[in-house]
Image (spheres, rainbow, N blue to C red):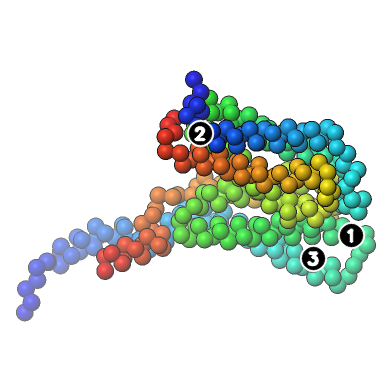
Amino acid sequence: MVDKKITDLEIEAILEAFSNSQPKVTDRTGQSSSFRVLFCFINLYVLLFIVLYFLLKINQVAELDPNSRTEEFLIVLEGRIFVLFWLLVFLNMTAYFNFGFKAVCLVILVYVLNSTIDNTILFSDLKDLLDESHFFVFMITIPLYVIAVAGLMIIYKDNFETFSPLTSEALSGKAA
Amino acid sequence: MFKSLQLPKAFWVSIIIGYAFCLLTFFVLLTASLDLLAPSQVLNNHTVTKLTGIRLAILTFGLFSISFTLKYSLMYAKYVTVALTVWAIAMYVDDHFVLYNMVEYPQEGVIALVQSLRPILIISLIWMCFELIFSPHLTD
């Protein structure tokens, strides 16, 4: 018979004491639900416009309408989507590694604000372009995107280093 | 007392380059004719001039803000400088991907000179950021 050094009652007490910390350790993001919603919105927004770009591109190749201003919109969308895609990649990477997230948010915020100012100044004279529904949607929703990025930057918690994938692996490695 | 007196000469050279760029752009806006722009462009000359004017106003305001905040707090001067640098880089990248596809600037003359000096302005701003962030002897 093995002589137990610790009783069942003591084991239960230890398990109960650590039960609160268990969900936190398993939660890899360590962020609030509103953060996740905004993060998903930002990802979906950019992906949606990437899809829209390709759809318009295919449509433009298929049928060339001389009265349509889709070509101008495509020039704008192509440049913006290219930059936003790479910024989105960096945003996801920094969120995953929990390093430099706010810096990337700041870059996106400044870039999108600059784009909004440019769009407002450059295309306010092109009434035909504003009549295009997809361009109008693009112009209208950009402020929403700015608000989402600003919100993401504000509610981001950067004091959960122990829960990030890199540091948690490092800790488990040390423990082993 | 100016806390900025602790700053090295390289910082002052960078900020002077920034002001010189603003003056040159202002001079171009007043004197140069944008009729040189290619006629096949999507955007008209008035729109491009308006955009340049607004950007110049923001840049000048930013540089004055840096000078002003240096008088009171190095921390706020650092934030303003970083924000202005990020904006200048974002603007430069955005122009290469969007604006230059819609406007064909002349390859010669004073407008081309201003266009070619933009990277120098960005380098100056980046240098100012490095000086404000990484200089060990700077204290608020």
Q: Position of residue A11 (x, y in %)?
A: 18, 65
Crowding at dot 1, Cα within 10 Å, few <14 / some 14-19 / many 20+, comes out as some
Q: Which residue is mark 3?
A: A56
- Are the residues flagged by discs 2 and 3 in contact, CB closer than 8 Å? no
Q: Which residue is mark 2?
A: B8
Q: Position of residue B30 (x, y in %)?
A: 83, 32
- Tell me whether marks 2 and 3 sit on the same chain: no
The answer for which chain carries disc 1 is A
Residue A57 position (above or below residue B26): below
Marks 1 and 3 sit apart, C-alpha to C-alpha, by 12 Å
Residue at 91%, 64% in the rendered image = A65
Q: Secondary structure at mark 3?
A: helix
Q: Secondary structure at mark 1?
A: loop
Residue at 88%, 70% in the rendered image = A63
Mark closest to the chain's N terminus, 1 or 3: 3
Q: Which residue is mark 1?
A: A68
Residue at 9%, 71% in the rendered image = A4
- Are the residues flagged by discs 1 and 2 in contact, CB closer than 8 Å? no
Inspect the image, locate mark 1, and give the three-letter code of the amino acid beneath it: Ser
Residue at 67%, 47% in the rendered image = B119
Q: Secondary structure at mark 2?
A: loop
Crowding at dot 3, Cα within 10 Å, few <14 / some 14-19 / many 20+, comes out as some
